[in-house]
Amino acid sequence: MESYRSMKMIKTDWKFLLVWLIPFLWVVARLITAIKG
């Protein structure tokens, strides 16, 4: 039941997650390019 609740919460907060995910992916891409040189 708890997993269903968290899934429902993720569905309602998908816009918030998207806003948080874009800068995170940008940072990851920057790290990858920095490592590759």
Image: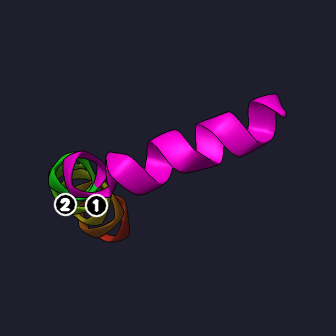
Is the C terminus in the top left, top right, bottom left or bottom right quadrant?
bottom left
User: x, y (%) of residue 29?
Assistant: 27, 66
User: Tag 2: residue type?
Assistant: Ile
Residue 16 lies within the magenta run: yes
Residue located beneath label 1 in the image: 25
Q: Which mark is residue 15?
A: none
Q: Residue at x 35, y 70 (%)?
A: 36
Residue located beneath label 2 in the image: 22
User: x, y (%) of residue 11?
Assistant: 44, 56
- Residues in magenta, as a range: 1-17
Element under disc 2: helix
**In the figure, is residue 34 to the left or right of 12?**
left
Residue 29 lies within the magenta run: no
Is the N terminus in the top left, top right, bottom left or bottom right quadrant?
top right
Element under disc 1: helix
**In the figure, is residue 33 to the left or right of 9?**
left
**Cβ atoms at labels 1 and 2 below 8 Å apart:** yes
Figure quadrant of residue 5: top right
Q: Nearer the viewer, mark 1 or mark 2?
A: 2
